[in-house]
Structures are given as C-alpha cells and as structure tokens.
Image (spheres, helix red, strand yellow):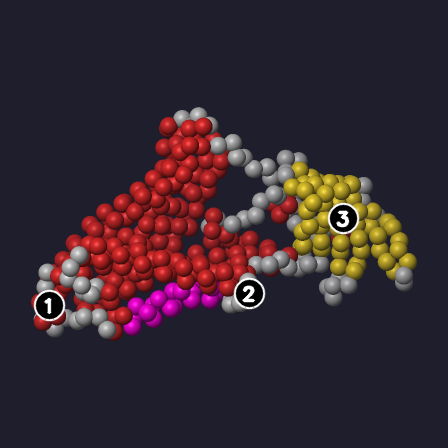
Amino acid sequence: MKIVEYLFRKVIPLFLGAIVFFALVLIMVDLMMNLWNFISNGVPGLKVLRIMGLYVPKCLWYATPIAMLFAVSYTLSDLYANNELIAIFASGISLTRFTFPLLVFAFGMSFALFFFDDKIVVPTYAKKTAEQEEVLNKDKSLNNDKIVILSDNGNICYKAEFYDDDSKRLNSLYIIVRNEDKSLNSVIRADSASWHDDRWFLSGAVQYTQENGTVTAGAVSSDITKKLTEPPETFQNNVISVETVDSATAKVYIEHLQKAGLPFAEPQSLYYKKFSFPFILFIVVFLSVGLSGKTRKNVMLMSLASCISAAVLFYVTQMITMLLAKFGAISPFMGAWFPVFMFVVIAAVVLRYART
C-alpha cells in the first residue's frame, strides 16, 4: 500500500496541473478566435467571462485524456531516470503489478468521464453556444421551407412548402400515404395543418384515392388523421448533432431516423462514440506504462512528445473509422470502437516489450 500511495502522490498533482494547463490553452484559443467578434458587437466583459465559463467543462473534458497521459508517462519516466523502479523490480514487483492500480483508476475514470460529458458538458456547452450566437447576432430561425419528411416507417410522407415554428403550422401540405407493402394508399392535399395536443389537424384537406383505375376525391379518413403524429420538432430548421445532446436524446433521435427510413449510420456511430471515447483514459495509461523508460534524458520533453503523438494518432484513427462508418464501409459500432480495440492491442504489445 505504501508503494501505491507513493505512486498516486506523484501522479495526481501532475494530472491536476496538466488538466488545468491544457484546459486553459483550449479556453484561450477559443477566446482568441472569437475576440474580434465580441469587440465588434460590443459584448460586455462579464458576458464574455460567462460564455468562457460555460466552455470550461468542455475544455476539461478534452484535456483530461492528454493530462492523464502526460502525468503517468512523466511519472514513470522520472522513476526510471532516478533508478527508483530498479529498486521496485529488485524487490520482486513487476511493472504490470506496480502500475495495475493506475489502470484500475483510469478504467473507473473512463466511466466518470462519460457521465461528466452526459450530465455536465452537454448542457453547459449548449448554453455556451446559444448565448454566444445570441450576443453575436447569429440567432437561427426554426422556420423551414420546402420540407420533405418520412414518417411511420416510410408509410407516410409529408411535403410542405413552409413550416412556421411560432404557430406550429404547415402550409401547402401534401401527404402521401402508403400501405404496409409500400403500395400507394392515397394522397392528401391540404391548405394547412396545425399541431394540437398530439397530432396534426388539417384545414382545407382533400383525400385522393385510386380504385380500379379511377381517382376519387373526398374527405380525409379518420384512420389516416390519427396517424399524423409526427412532432413539430421534425419540421424545424435544425439538424440535431448527436455530439451536442445527451445519450438519451441521441438515442431517441436515432430511433426517429430509423423509423422514418432516413440515413442513420453517421449519427449512430457518433452515439456509440459517446461511450467509446471516455475509454481513451484507460488506453493512454496503458500506453504510458509501455512507453515509459524509453529514455533517461529530457524526461519532460519526451513525455510531452509521446502524449501529443499518441493523442494525435488516436484522433486521426478515430476520424478515419468514423468516416468509414458514415459511408457504410464498416458498421457504426466498429467506427466508434475499433480505435479503442486497436490501441488496447498496441498498448499490450508495447507493454510486452517494455523495460522491466
């Protein structure tokens, strides 16, 4: 226990210092990128501070893996350089056994990072984005035009000229209704449709039905009107980014895309990424254990170089796999999780040939 306590006394202060440093760098970069816009729009300093404050959780989330990699890599390399690990190995404690508490700590931190993102980072970053767009006069209207929406597993298709979000109203609406076998059931033409309670109510609507080669026009069937339950949010001029909502909302959104018969590979891979990305903490510690002790000189410089190189390699690999998932070359699950599996194997191989 004394050895474990000694190890964590060295790692934790470095980890906390590194996470503050990297987070501050990210905050300053974002501030410099938007500083001229803030000045030109006359944004008060306190408002800018509030916006930057809302960005802090996101920066901490980004900085945590790099800070963990640096802290562990520097600590172990420093122990090698000072010959402290030689005494530990001579006492019969292997490198794997010595660093096992760090691996357990990183594994637990991976779960904590997921919940931190889901419960804190997502809402604060959404507020930051909304307030920044407001002060920079970049408010986005939710009204939409020339809309085509599939619903009810592709059995109902809405085509509207315009959607007014304030009144929850669709104008110049056509609705194509299909049977379960995807054959045409009927076409509905309505002047408008208004959302009340849990469905759309049509105004000036006519239903056209084809029977035995003859097209007949009449009132809209009540069986069909009961199915017009696609929520107004679907018609808004916005596309939900899975990365900017919590996991529960993302899951509902993906289920909607599947139900509507719309492409869902990219958002589903981003949904899986919410769960896979936090495990980069475990990977970086695993890599650090294997990479430590490669040099006794310039420990600080080599630790920084190794953590930046490993982080860049992981992010590039994940970017490639996510693109492959987007275009259907691999499954969304593999798009998000393949880099994790690959780097766990790499870390295991590096550890196998580490100095012990």
Q: Classify 10 Å Cα crowding around label 1: few (below 14), some (14-19), many (20 and above).
A: some
Q: Quadrant of residue 127?
A: top left
Residue to which mark 3 is pinned: 174
Residue at 54% across / 48% down in the picture?
A: 240
Residue extent of the magenta highlight:
333-349
Please tell me which of labels 1 and 3 falls first in the chain: 1
Specify the quadrant that holds the C terminus: bottom left
- In reply to whether residue 345 is colored magenta, the answer given is yes
Q: Is residue 91 above or below residue 76?
A: below
Residue at 45% across / 28% down in the picture?
A: 40
- Label 1, label 3: how many angstroms apart (C-alpha)? 77 Å
Q: Is residue 291 above or below residue 119?
A: below
Q: Quadrant of residue 290?
A: bottom left
- Label 3, label 2: how many angstroms apart (C-alpha)? 32 Å
Is 241 on the left-hand or right-hand side of 124? right
Please tell me which of labels 2 and 1 falls first in the chain: 1
Is 301 on the left-hand or right-hand side of 185? left
Q: Is residue 56 above or below residue 117?
A: above
Q: Which of the two discs, 1 and 3, sits closer to the camera?
A: 1
Residue to which mark 1 is pinned: 86
Residue type at mark 1? Ile
Residue at 38% across / 54% down in the picture?
A: 114
Q: Position of residue 122 (x, y in %)?
A: 43, 46
* Nearer to the camera, 45 or 35: 35
Q: Classify 10 Å Cα crowding around label 3: few (below 14), some (14-19), many (20 and above).
A: many
Residue type at mark 2? Gly
Residue to which mark 2 is pinned: 328
Residue 69 seen anywhere in this rendered image of the structure? no
Q: Which of the two discs, 3 and 2, sits closer to the camera?
A: 2
Residue type at mark 3? Tyr
